[in-house]
């Protein structure tokens, strides 16, 4: 039987007020429907925001360690359901099973980490310039946070946002992506079953144009956290600016991997295959550009092509599959469009792939062959624009300085990597690469939850996801400075004396 899912508002599972619904399908086999979901409208968002606003008055006063206990229980339940939810992610999003389970594991890790932050929401104690006076800073929640997440990490990225938002004392209205709503439901069920108080966490399904737009413009939303395209991120920034509400934007990437002439080429090939074709290239951290020193260009390319041609397309639930489908028919058309651009506009060569596979076993899915482009120049569109598919452009560089220049010559600044055995090359690259994350002798993929995640330029607006100094807690709290004067008189700072 077709499973029916609902919104989660004020602690209850409810249908959309309109009664309308939409379907989620398996991108590896579009004949298989995952479930039906409420196509919500403004009224549903209003109900969720009202519930969150009311719940905030209680939740913000729950001691942070106690809030952490709810989060710990939710993480524990999620851990117990890892295999079931991981398989659901595989079927609904399409990436291979071990990656899908890794998606859930990242959410589990984030849950336990942020639960612990309930005892580490530290401020500072500060020495005053005046006698008999103390100063301290504390972190305070903002209120109701709107969380809007993408489909490529349907449990990990919502967890990146929900857990820190809640531990800081905020309440949440969460809009999951329409391509992977079932995975989001299962995550929210973990919080419900952990006993999270009604209204603290709310989820509203529906389109970005209706539900998302209502959230970002709602007068009672106090902050927004968004992961998705730069175009949508710009719209969110414009909507938040008139009310001066905090907004965290995590957007696109066009990440470069530098291969130096002294690199371990086998290691570099492994890293580039994983970065370029893991999650079918549908990651903001995907290594979609490989910049190779001219001395090892031919040798690297030979090994890289050999490895890529061995990748097996198929259903992610099949243990023999290396690369799953794209998320939608629109994604397939987008990648096809870039193949035309590559051939006709950029005049580059498609060394392998570049087509929809002819295997009849794959005809019901959104599959596209792993693709390598060569003779690519930095100004070419395929080297500048985020394709978000299994496509890697290979560029040639004369030396390290040129390689770094090429790597930086994009509008994005999320992740970068260099393969080299030279310590000086590694440190120079780490200093000069214009990205929020740099990897030495590793793939551009592989962020760990206790370190800040995010980028610069058109990738982000200064906020970071995940943990660590400067991480998500900065997004979900404001700093309040408390001055306590016990001198018994009005003291003036900066040496000011009244009446003089």
Image (spheres, rainbow, N blue to C red):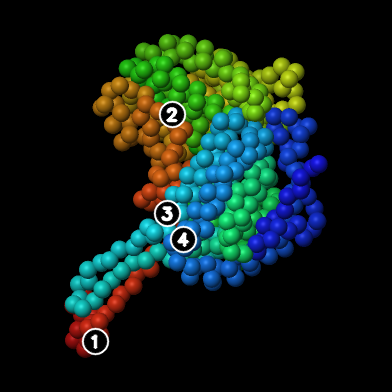
Q: Are marks 4 and 1 in contact (CB under 8 Å)?
A: no
Q: Earlier in the sequence, mark 2 or mark 1?
A: 2
What's the residue at 51%, 32% (across, down)? 286
Q: Which of 439 and 229 is in front in this view?
A: 439
Q: Nearer the viewer, mark 4 or mark 2?
A: 4
* Image quadrant occupied by the N terminus: top right
Q: Earlier in the sequence, mark 1 or mark 3?
A: 3
**How far, Cα to Cα, is label 4 from label 2?**
32 Å
**Local secondary structure at mark 1:** loop
Measuring from the top left, give residue 229's x and y in whole percent: 57, 43
**How far, Cα to Cα, is label 1 from label 3?**
39 Å
Query: To which residue does mark 3 refer?
Result: 116
Query: To which residue does mark 4 refer?
Result: 168
**How far, Cα to Cα, is label 4 from label 1?**
35 Å
Q: Are marks 2 and 3 in contact (CB under 8 Å)?
A: no
Left or right: where 75 falls relative to 340 = left
**How far, Cα to Cα, is label 4 from label 3?**
11 Å
Q: Which of 353 and 404 is in front in this view?
A: 353
């Amino acid at each position: 039987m077709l499973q029916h899912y609902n919104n989660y508002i004020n602690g209850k599972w409810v249908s959309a007020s309109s009664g309308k619904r939409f379907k989620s399908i398996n991108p590896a086999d579009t004949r298989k429907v995952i479930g039906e979901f409420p196509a919500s409208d403004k009224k549903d968002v209003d109900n969720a925001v009202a519930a969150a606003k009311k719940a905030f008055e209680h939740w913000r006063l729950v001691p942070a360690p106690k809030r952490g206990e709810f989060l710990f229980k939710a993480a524990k339940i999620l851990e117990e359901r890892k295999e079931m939810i991981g398989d659901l992610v595989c079927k609904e999003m399409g990436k291979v099973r071990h990656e899908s389970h890794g998606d859930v594991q990242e959410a589990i890790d984030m849950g336990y980490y942020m639960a612990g932050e309930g005892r580490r929401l530290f401020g500072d104690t500060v020495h005053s310039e005046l006698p008999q006076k103390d100063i301290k800073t504390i972190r305070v929640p903002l209120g109701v946070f709107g969380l809007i997440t993408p489909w490529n990490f349907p449990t990990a990225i919502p967890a990146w946002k929900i857990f820190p938002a809640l531990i800081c004392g905020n309440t949440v209205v969460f809009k999951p992506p329409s391509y992977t709503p079932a995975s989001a439901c299962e995550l929210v069920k973990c919080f419900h079953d952990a006993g999270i108080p009604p209204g603290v966490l709310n989820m509203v399904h529906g389109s970005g144009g209706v539900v998302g737009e209502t959230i970002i413009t709602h007068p009672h939303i106090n902050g927004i956290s968004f992961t998705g395209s730069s175009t949508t991120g710009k719209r969110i920034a414009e909507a938040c600016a008139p009310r001066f509400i905090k907004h965290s934007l995590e957007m696109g990437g066009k990440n470069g991997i530098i291969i130096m002439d002294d690199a371990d080429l086998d290691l570099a090939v492994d890293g580039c295959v994983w970065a370029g074709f893991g999650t079918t290239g549908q990651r903001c951290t995907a290594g979609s550009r490989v910049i190779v020193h001219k001395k090892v260009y031919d040798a690297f390319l030979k090994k890289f092509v050999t490895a890529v041609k061995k990748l097996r397309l198929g259903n992610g639930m099949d243990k023999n599959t290396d690369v799953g489908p794209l998320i939608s028919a629109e994604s397939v058309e987008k990648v096809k469009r870039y193949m035309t651009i590559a051939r006709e506009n950029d005049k580059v060569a498609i060394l392998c792939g570049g087509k929809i596979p002819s295997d009849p076993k794959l005809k019901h899915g959104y599959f596209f062959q792993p693709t390598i482009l060569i003779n690519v120049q930095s100004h070419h569109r395929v080297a500048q624009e985020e394709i978000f598919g299994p496509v890697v452009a290979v560029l040639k560089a004369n030396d390290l300085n040129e390689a770094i220049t090429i790597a930086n010559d994009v509008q994005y600044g999320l992740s970068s990597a260099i393969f080299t055995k030279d310590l000086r090359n590694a440190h120079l690259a780490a200093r000069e690469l214009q990205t929020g994350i740099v990897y030495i002798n590793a793939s551009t993929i592989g962020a760990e939850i206790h370190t800040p995640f995010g980028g610069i330029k058109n990738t982000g607006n200064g906020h970071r996801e995940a943990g660590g100094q400067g991480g998500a807690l900065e997004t979900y709290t404001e700093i309040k400075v408390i001055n306590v004067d016990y001198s018994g008189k009005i003291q003036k700072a900066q040496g000011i004396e009244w009446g003089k």
